[in-house]
Each structure stands twice: as structure tokens, then as C-alpha cells.
Image (spheres, coloured by chain):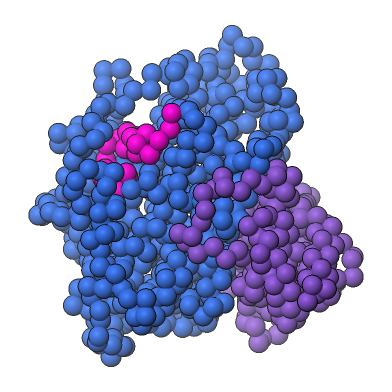
Chain colours: A blue, B purple
């Protein structure tokens, strides 16, 4: 089975990304000028479905409604304010150069392309850097309470892997404050009747008519009712798929169902193996662990990372003298020190733990020590900067980080892969757009800190509302689609069948037990470091787990009620297919790149070796059926402005 | 640890509910309260019983989804969200009562899940600054004094969990509503809509069936984010000011 799946075929390369030509700084202006517009009087006749209410979805829903479109929006939470963007801690980048420290749009563009290890599309990244400055203006106008200086102006800080101070923040709750800004803008449009909001409603399928996205199938999570909604365009802002690993920093309900079912309906899935492992999470305490908690990497600005020099040193941190500590990031990467990019910090932590020098239960942790920062800045200043993070750490671990060093370990945090989109953020299904973490985005193979919030809001407030105009103007749908249409009826039938099948098995294993099993397999073989052998093992194992799932899954209750076990099981159905594609993508990409390290592809001194000649492309996969080998379409990446170099942070 | 849980079970909004007892064993002190409930639910599923429904999502104290009354206290004995409460706060052999938020404006959906959409409607009534995308001036055009920015932030920290309502003997939403009003009204950007905001939000709050405030202070005691009680006084001042201005 697995050998057949791994024997994928290569289809036509992606010929047109719709990115305009000309000087890169003028491309976004050019695209906006060439785009057709929809007459303001006609906009209310257009319905647009938006799935998700995080930074991207909330911003897009509010902005499209402000423009006059009729928006129909969905979220699975009880309120649009709870989307997982809310948990982002550190900050949001913008090339404002308020510090006069040499920042510019071009530098943010350059840093993002380089940070992404040359696997992102230059035109998109440059647009993101340009828009970054408008995002800050927009958020401030909405009342987002960013940190300020005593003079009343905005404060900024430098953030993971960057040498300028361009990150705006609201203590350790930047995501929360930005999301509340978008949520409030959306609330204004809900009150005005321009957005029809459906909370506690989950998208379970995409409805295409003659290959064009025209609607979605949803389940009301309170009463289990399946219904359909139709529109002139569908926007997916449903977030990332990190929960395929079971343990991640994602919220418990974050899932891949919307993007995966869109993929099954024809949307290519790009770079699924590009996942980001975040270096600063609280280590797990046992098998009961349900999720991992991130500690903002802004902590690396002032905290020093170390482990004992000796293996198996179990003395408490305070009893280990300075000379017997290994500040390994400062030692290996003297110019960046503790601020090396996420993937490097994560892998280095794994390496020292694999050497037997890890600390805490099970040796799966490294110290993040603030003793020097407290001596230098004083405890009050440290508390002002990181107080809420320290409190959170203490609540979870019952250890006081002002007195003993924090323990941290890497965890899955973000997925750079996602639905393939063109410059207009349109997928390969006409009329289906993907924004925010749901698309394969602008981060290439590795996302820089404080860039996810920027991209989510950039897509939602500025990019999509401009580009979707062009689509709607060129494709005015005059035909009405309803449930009697064969393709709509088929989507509804398949949705119902899947739920009925889950309920009918009545086996002897819980949804969580399968989720944990697939997650552990992915962490082991498709995590920070990968080998061909391991990936082949995973590819052989996944179909077996899938087969067992459909034989032994137990879902209590019925489909016509509030049933959280059914929701969970239905999401696992998609993880069991997505996991396979992730492993295949990882297997085919026989290079070390960005967030992932391929053990067969390293330099003599053990650093990641990228192979641009063979893999300088984005891999967009076309679905051909469960367990059927997918088709690879390559988007060649051309670098006209930032020339690929091997990253060096020494 | 071995514990006895007494949990509120209710099939749906219209069905009658009752407390049901469950024994859980092998509970680690490192588990969060919700991980303890996960353990119970895994057992219930395998025994062919209906698992206990409860709202939860981020499990790091920021999304505001989790909402349990534990031994009579909203979010339990520590000043935090339920998801950040750990079993080390309990002792082996304890009996723990677990109930949903109790307030007439928050009807029970199932078991421990309640409908908090009334909070969304309060925000929709005026909990925003009208700033359509693209209309924003340069971010540094208006300086905001640091004390005002800090005060706005302190109120903006509200996670909308509803513990304030659950803790209040009157089921009042004054602390929630005041947090948003004080976040926005203290900022120069929020000033043009200052009066309509407080009048419309307070009117909506009353319409939703939340009770009045008798300054019991239970709300601020239960608030996992430390929204201060004087926030309500500040809202009352804003409201009086707006009414007088007519």
C-alpha cells in the first residue's frame, strides 16, 4: 500500500502565479490597478462565505462587509472572539523604522525571504512587508492597546533572529489584543446586518459546481443539523494543522478539516511538511498531557539558555557552578547567541537532550535562565516585560522563574504549509480563497517570530479585500445554486455518510487514543529531524492506523445532538490522510531546509544543507483519493532580489 | 489521587438536569483540571456512557472558553481560568462539585456548556471604535499618555469567560461591560463614540437579562484576569456623564 502511495507522479508545473512583473516595489500597486472593481452599488448583491474568525478571517469578514459585500461567516467556537490567534503572545512585525535603526520595507522583505530559507514567493513577501506599516496604523485606530513609551509613542522590541527593533507588542498578549480589534470591527458589521455570523458551526465540506467554489456544508454543533450555504466566493481562514501532532501549542479544537476537505475537492496542498517547531515551550509532564504551552520567544531576548556540561547532571540549577554550565547557543552561534532562528534553537535543544544533558523530568528540557537579566535590569523591569509569562509558567509548573530557571523544550507551533494560493490568495479551485495560516503563505520553510500576526492581518484587512474584487467582478454568478444541484447533494450525502459511519462502528478505542497514536508517529518521524527510513516507516504505518480506526473507533451518542466526541473523531478522519501527505512531502524533499532537518542532507559540520538546484520550488500536491498516490505540481521559485545563500548565524 | 466528582448532567437546554457522581482514580497532581476531566471522559466512552460536555480550547488561559464552577467557585479555588487550575490544588480523597456557569442570561447548552452569546451582543451594541479598514491615520499621529495606554490595556485583558456573571449573586455583567467601555473610552481614538458606547452597551446588557450591580465584589474576586472592581464605578461615571449630556 505505502509503496504505491509513495510512488507519486509529477504533473504539470504551475505555470502562472498571477504575480505581476516589473520592479518588485511596484507590483502590488500594479496588481491593484489592473484588478477589476465591483461597483459599490452592486456589492451587496454578492455573498461571500468566510470560514474562521481569527486574525485573517475576522479582519476579512469585517473589511468585506465594510466594502458592502454580504458576508456569511462561521466559527466552531461559541464566539468569534475565541479563535486561536488570541493565544499569540510575542508581537507583530512592521517596517516602521520608528527606532531609526536601519529598518525598511526592503529589509523586512529580505529578512522574511532569508528567514524562510528561500522557499517563499518573493512578490508575496514584498507585498507583506509593504502592508506591514498599514496594519499597525489600522490596529492603533481600532484602539489596540500596544505598549507605549513614556512620551506616549509606540514601543517596539527586537524579536527572534532579527537585528532591528520592529516588533510591536501588547505585553505578552499581542494576539489577544489584535484579535479583539478584528472581532470588534466584525461585531460592528454583525450589528449593522452586513455579516451573518454562525458561531458553533463547523465547515465539513466544500461545494463546487463545475469546478468553481459555490458553497459549503456545515454542521451546527449544538443540534447536529447539517445545512448548506451558498455564495459567490468562499474564503477559508481556518488556521493551521499543527494538531496532527496531537501535542502542539495549538488550541484543542484547531483542526485541518476545512482545508483538507477543500483539498479533496481540488485545491492543491502546498509544502505540507513545512511545520514549525517552537523552541520555547513548557516541557510535558506525563501521558495525560493534552496540549503544550508556548512561552513567548521574546523571553530569549533576556533569558540565557543552558544545560549542564556533564551528562546526567541531576543537581538543582542553583548548585551548578558557572564553569560547569554550557550556554550552548552563545557558544555555537556567538553573533546571534540566544536569538538564533527558531529551527536552529529547537534542533540545538534536541541535540543536547539527545546527548543526555537535558534537565527536568525525563531529561526533555533545557534551562532558560533570567538570573543575569534580573541582576542587570532589576526584578521590576523584568516583571514589567515578562510578568504575565512568568505568572503563567508558575501556574503550570509550580516553579517560580524569578528564583529558579525556566525549563523549556521545543513543540509544534505553526504550519507554514497549507492550501496553495496564487498572488491573489486564490487556490486552484476558482472562487476559493485561503488566507492566514490556512494558506501556504509567505513564510517559506520557516516563519520568523512575530510574522504570523502580520500575515494574518495583512491577508485579511488588505490583500484579500482587494483581490477578491477582481474575481467577483469577472465572475458574476447569475445562476442560483441550491441543494437540488447534484454536486451540492453529493457533498451533503458524503458528509452525512461519514458521520453515520463514525457512529456505526461502535468499536473499543476512543478518538483521543487514535489522535495520540498518529501524533506520536508524526513527532517521531516527521518532526524536527527526518530520515528516509523513518518516513518510509511512517508511510507504511499510517494506512494501518487508518484501517484500525475504521474498525475500532467508538463514538458515543448520536449525530443529532451536541457531541464533542463526534466532532473529534471527524477531525481525526482528516488527520489520518493529511499525515500521509505530510510524510510523503517530507520524503520527497530530500534536503534540509528551514524548519526541517533531513539527516541525509547535512554539511560535514552537521549544519543543514539546502539543495536549491533540486528543491528550489514549492510542492503543490493534487489529491487523487484516499491512499491513492497524489500528483506533484511544482511552482518554481525565482529569486530576483534576494539571492539564495546558505543561512549562517555563526 | 482518587477523587469523587459530582458533575451537573443535562442533555440539552430544555431537559431537566441533575448532579451525577463519578469516581476517578490515578489522577496526577501535574494534571490540569481539564486533563482530569479528559481522563473521566475516556473512561465514560469506553463504558458506553455519554462523556461530560464542557467548553475548552486554548488551555492556556487566554481564549476564555473554559467555564466551570468548581466547589461553588467560578474557575475553582485559584485565581485563574479552569484550564490553568492544576490538581495539586486538591487532595487525595476529595469530593469535587463541578457545575456550569449559573445565570439566566447564560442558558445551559449541555452539561457544563452554556450559551454566552449575550456577551457578543453587548459588544455588538458599541464595544468597538468605528475605524473602517484603510481609514487609519499614521500610528504616531496621536500620542497616548502611558498611564492611559496602560489603563486601556488593563481593561482590554478581559477574556470574556463570564466568571464575573457566574460569581455574582445577581448574575450581573457589569464587570465585563465596564472592562470594554473603560478600554475604549480612555483612549483618544475612542473618544468620539464615548457617550453612545456606554449608553448602548449598558442598555443591551439590561435587555439581555443580566442582573444589576449591588457592589458585592464577587465578580472582581473571581476574575481570572484581575479586572478591578473600580472599573464598574468608572463605567457608572461614564454613563451618568453621557445621560447628563443627553
Question: Toward which corner of the image does residue B73 lie, by quadrant?
Answer: bottom right
Q: Residue at x 30, y 62 (%)?
A: A467
Would you say A419 lies left or right of A406 here?
A: left
Q: Position of residue A397 (x, y in %)?
A: 67, 39
For the N terminus of chain A, the image quarter is: bottom left
Magenta span includes A516 = no
**Closest to the observer: A78 or A458?**
A458
Q: Is residue A97 visible?
A: yes
Instruction: Name the residue at the top extreme.
Output: A323
- Percent from the top left, x then y, of residue B2? 72, 54
Answer whether residue B51 is visible to the viewer in this image.
Answer: no
Number of on-image labels: 0
In this view of the protein, which residue sits in the foreground, A77 or A373?
A: A373
Give x and y (percent) for residue B228.
80, 55
Quadrant of residue A621 in the image? bottom left
Q: Is residue A104 magenta?
A: yes
In this picture, is A513 found above or below A98? below
Image quarter of the C terminus of chain A: top left
Q: Residue at x 71, y 60 (%)?
A: B185
Q: Is residue B12 left or right of residue A95?
A: right
Of A629 and A361, the residue lying toward us: A629
Q: Which residues are magenta?
A: A102-126
Of helix, strand and loop, which mostly describes the magenta segment? helix
Q: Residue at x 58, y 11 (%)?
A: A324
Q: Position of residue A315 (x, y in %)?
A: 65, 19
Residue name at image x 14 percent, y 34 percent: A613
Which image quarter: residue B41? bottom right
Viewer-proximal residue, A265 or A232? A232
In screen coordinates, is A383 left or right of A450? right
Amino acid at each position: 500500500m505505502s509503496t504505491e502511495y509513495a510512488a507519486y507522479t509529477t504533473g504539470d508545473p504551475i505555470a502562472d502565479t498571477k504575480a505581476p512583473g516589473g520592479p518588485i516595489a511596484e507590483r502590488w500597486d500594479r496588481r491593484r490597478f489592473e484588478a477589476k472593481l465591483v461597483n459599490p452599488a452592486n456589492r451587496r448583491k454578492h455573498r461571500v462565505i468566510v470560514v474562521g474568525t481569527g486574525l485573517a478571517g475576522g479582519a476579512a469578514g469585517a473589511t468585506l462587509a465594510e466594502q458592502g459585500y454580504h458576508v456569511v461567516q462561521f466559527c466552531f467556537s461559541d464566539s468569534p472572539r475565541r479563535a486561536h490567534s488570541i493565544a499569540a503572545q510575542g508581537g507583530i512585525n512592521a517596517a516602521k523604522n520608528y527606532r531609526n535603526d536601519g529598518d525598511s520595507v526592503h529589509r523586512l522583505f529580505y529578512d522574511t525571504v532569508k528567514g524562510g530559507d528561500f522557499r517563499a514567493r518573493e512578490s508575496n513577501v514584498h507585498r507583506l512587508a509593504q502592508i506591514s506599516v498599514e496594519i499597525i496604523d489600522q490596529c492603533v485606530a481600532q484602539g489596540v492597546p500596544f505598549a507605549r513609551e513614556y512620551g506616549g509613542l509606540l514601543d517596539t522590541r527586537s524579536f527572534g533572529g532579527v537585528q532591528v527593533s520592529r516588533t510591536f507588542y501588547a505585553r505578552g498578549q499581542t494576539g489577544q489584543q489584535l484579535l479583539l480589534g478584528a472581532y470588534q470591527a466584525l461585531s460592528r458589521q454583525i450589528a449593522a446586518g452586513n455579516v451573518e455570523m454562525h458561531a458553533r458551526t463547523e465547515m465539513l465540506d466544500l461545494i463546487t459546481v463545475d469546478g468553481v467554489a459555490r458553497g459549503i456544508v456545515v454542521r451546527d454543533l449544538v443540534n447536529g443539523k447539517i445545512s448548506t450555504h451558498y455564495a459567490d466566493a468562499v474564503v477559508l481562514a481556518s488556521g493551521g494543522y499543527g494538531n496532527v501532532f496531537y501535542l502542539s501549542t495549538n488550541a484543542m479544537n484547531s483542526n485541518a478539516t476545512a482545508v483538507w476537505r477543500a483539498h479533496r475537492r481540488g485545491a492543491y496542498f502546498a509544502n505540507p511538511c513545512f511545520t514549525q517547531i517552537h523552541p520555547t515551550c513548557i516541557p510535558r509532564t506525563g501521558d495525560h498531557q493534552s496540549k503544550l504551552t508556548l512561552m513567548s520567544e521574546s523571553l530569549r531576548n533576556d533569558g540565557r539558555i543552558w544545560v549542564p556540561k556533564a551528562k546526567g547532571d541531576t543537581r538543582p540549577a542553583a548548585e551548578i557552578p558557572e564553569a560547569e554550565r554550557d550556554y550552548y547557543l552563545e557558544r555555537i552561534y556567538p553573533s546571534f547567541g540566544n536569538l538564533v532562528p527558531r529551527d536552529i534553537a529547537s534542533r540545538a535543544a534536541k541535540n543536547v537532550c539527545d546527548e543526555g544533558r537535558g534537565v527536568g523530568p525525563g531529561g526533555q528540557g533545557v534551562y532558560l535562565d533570567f538570573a543575569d537579566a534580573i541582576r542587570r535590569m532589576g526584578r521590576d523591569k523584568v516583571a514589567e516585560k515578562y510578568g504575565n509569562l512568568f505568572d503563567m509558567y508558575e501556574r503550570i509548573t509550580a516553579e517560580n522563574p524569578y528564583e529558579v530557571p525556566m525549563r523549556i523544550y521545543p513543540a509544534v507551533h505553526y504550519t507554514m504549509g497549507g492550501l496553495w494560493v496564487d498572488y491573489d490568495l486564490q487556490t486552484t479551485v476558482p472562487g476559493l480563497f485561503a488566507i492566514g495560516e490556512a494558506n501556504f503563505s509567505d513564510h517559506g520553510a520557516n516563519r520568523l517570530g512575530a510574522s504570523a500576526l502580520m500575515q494574518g492581518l495583512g491577508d485579511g484587512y488588505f490583500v484579500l479585500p482587494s483581490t477578491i474584487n477582481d474575481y467577483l467582478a469577472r465572475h458574476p454568478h447569475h445562476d442560483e445554486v441550491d441543494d437540488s444541484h447534484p454536486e451540492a447533494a453529493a457533498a451533503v450525502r458524503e458528509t452525512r455518510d461519514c458521520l453515520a459511519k463514525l457512529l456505526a462502528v461502535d468499536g473499543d478505542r476512543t478518538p483521543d487514543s487514535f489522535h495520540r497514536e498518529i501524533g506520536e508517529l508524526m513527532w517521531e518521524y516527521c518532526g524536527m529531524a527526518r530520515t528516509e527510513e523513518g518516513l518510509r516507516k511512517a508511510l507504511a504505518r499510517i494506512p494501518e492506523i487508518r484501517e484500525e480506526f475504521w474498525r475500532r473507533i467508538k463514538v458515543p451518542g448520536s449525530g443529532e445532538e451536541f457531541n464533542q466526541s463526534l466532532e473529534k473523531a471527524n477531525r481525526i478522519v482528516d488527520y489520518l490522510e493529511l499525515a500521509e501527505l505530510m510524510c510523503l512531502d517530507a520524503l520527497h524533499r530530500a534536503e534540509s531546509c528551514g524548519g526541517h532537518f533531513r539527516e541525509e542532507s547535512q554539511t560535514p559540520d552537521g549544519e543543514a544543507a539546502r539543495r536549491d538546484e533540486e528543491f528550489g520550488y514549492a510542492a503543490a500536491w493534487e489529491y487523487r483519493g484516499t491512499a491513492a498516490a497524489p500528483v506533484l505540481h511544482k511552482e518554481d521559485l525565482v529569486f530576483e532580489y534576494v539571492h539564495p545563500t546558505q543561512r549562517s548565524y555563526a | 489521587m482518587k477523587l469523587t466528582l459530582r458533575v451537573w448532567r443535562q442533555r440539552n437546554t430544555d431537559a431537566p438536569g441533575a448532579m451525577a457522581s463519578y469516581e476517578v482514580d490515578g489522577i496526577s497532581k501535574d494534571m490540569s483540571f481539564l486533563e482530569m476531566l479528559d481522563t473521566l471522559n475516556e473512561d465514560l466512552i469506553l463504558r458506553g456512557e455519554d462523556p461530560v460536555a464542557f467548553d475548552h480550547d486554548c488551555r492556556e488561559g487566554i481564549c476564555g472558553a473554559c467555564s466551570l464552577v468548581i466547589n461553588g467557585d467560578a474557575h475553582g479555588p485559584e485565581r485563574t481560568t479552569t484550564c490553568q487550575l492544576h490538581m495539586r490544588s486538591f487532595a487525595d480523597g476529595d469530593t469535587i462539585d463541578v457545575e456550569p456557569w449559573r445565570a439566566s442570561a447564560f442558558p445551559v447548552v449541555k452539561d457544563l456548556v452554556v450559551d454566552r452569546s449575550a456577551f457578543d451582543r453587548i459588544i455588538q451594541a458599541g464595544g468597538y471604535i468605528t475605524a473602517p479598514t484603510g481609514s487609519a491615520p499614521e500610528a504616531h499621529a496621536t500620542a497616548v499618555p502611558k498611564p492611559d495606554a496602560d489603563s486601556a490595556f488593563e481593561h482590554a485583558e478581559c477574556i470574556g469567560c463570564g466568571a464575573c456573571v457566574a460569581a455574582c449573586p445577581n448574575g450581573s455583567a457589569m464587570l465585563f461591560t465596564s472592562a470594554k467601555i473603560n478600554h475604549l473610552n480612555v483612549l483618544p481614538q475612542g473618544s468620539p463614540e464615548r457617550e453612545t458606547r456606554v449608553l448602548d452597551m449598558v442598555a443591551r446588557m439590561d435587555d439581555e437579562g443580566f442582573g444589576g450591580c449591588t457592589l458585592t465584589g464577587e465578580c472582581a474576586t473571581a476574575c481570572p484576569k484581575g479586572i478591578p472592581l473600580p472599573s464598574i464605578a468608572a463605567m457608572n461615571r461614564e454613563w451618568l456623564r453621557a445621560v447628563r449630556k443627553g
